[in-house]
Amino acid sequence: MKKPKLVVANWKMHLTIHQASVLVNRLSKTVNPHRGVEVVLAPNYLCLQPLSNEIDRRQFRLAAQDGYFIDEGSFTGAVSFAQLRELVQYSIIGHSERRRYFDESLETVRDKVAAAVRNNIIPILCVGETKEERAQRETKQILHDQIVTALSNLTSEDVSNIVLAYEPIWAIGGSEPAKPDIIEKAVSWIRYQVRELYGKEVEDSVRVLYGGSDEPEFVADIMSIKGIDGLLVGHASLNYEQFADIIMGVHLATLNDSDQADKG
Ligand code: 13P
């Protein structure tokens, strides 16, 4: 069975508990649940508990933005996936901001992915290249290394459940996403890596998202790219009207998909 499309709101280090609650309240009144679209909210750790009591799970699910790779112990300041599992279904892992500002290595990301899976949390593994790496034509190598290392401690069954997000670092936080042909090439390469390592069935089962300046006006174009199953939205997810428009755009894209399938 085809998995639903996925729209993930990465709120990053924005919003207090009160502000997050106000935003969820507005979203819950604006966003209609659609059968083919799963909407996931990723607030900061502090907001997870209160939001888990406020949301209707038919409408929204929760994700962490990170987690520690050891389940329990003397690690002051850390929050483990074993602790998060009561609250979240998903976790963003290996976001470029974590790799860059918190020095997360390929191996740390690998261990976090394994820890999430061990705790029944679906990883949303972020991969992507910098502007310089693209200019040096290193994009394929970078994506290869990020994917192969991150998945190396998983079984094919584990991998078939994960979500990959292509986030070119140079397209994050701007006003325009990467051009569709660039996204298509990268996504096809990402899928090829999964197919080479785990086979076609696993590739077909994995969902691949695009993230980087996703705004409502670009949703139709991005969702029509082959191999794309949804969006990882940053700043536009902090505005309830824009985020609701993005969800609606993804919903409309699923309707187009099923029209095509009916005709095919
Ligand atoms: P923006 O949508 O703000 O570019 O952020 C993208 C992102 O980093 C989502 O994880």
Image (tube, grey):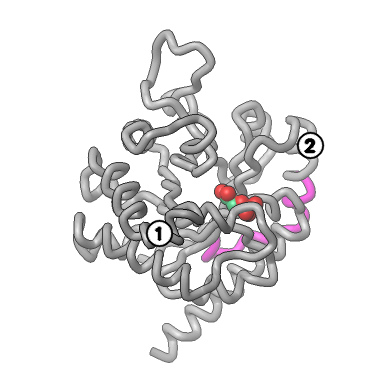
Q: Secondary structure at mark 1?
A: loop
Q: Position of residue 210 (x, y in %)?
A: 51, 60
Q: Residue at x 31, y 42 (%)?
A: 150
Q: Is residue 195 magenta?
A: no
Which quarter of the figure has residue 170? bottom right
Label 2 residue near ligand 1, CB within 8 Å: no
Q: Residue at x 64, y 26 (%)?
A: 46
- Within 10 Å of disc 2 (Cα), the crowding (few <14, some 14-19, many 20+) is few
**For mark 1, what is the residue?**
136
Q: Residue 19 — which label?
A: 2
Q: Secondary structure at mark 2?
A: helix
Residue 216 in the image: above or below residue 15: below
Q: Is residue 32 magenta?
A: yes
Q: Residue at x 51, y 74 (%)?
A: 180
Task: State the extent of the magenta-drawn residues as a range.
Answer: 25-37
Q: Looking at the picture, which amino acid does disc 2 mark? A: Gln
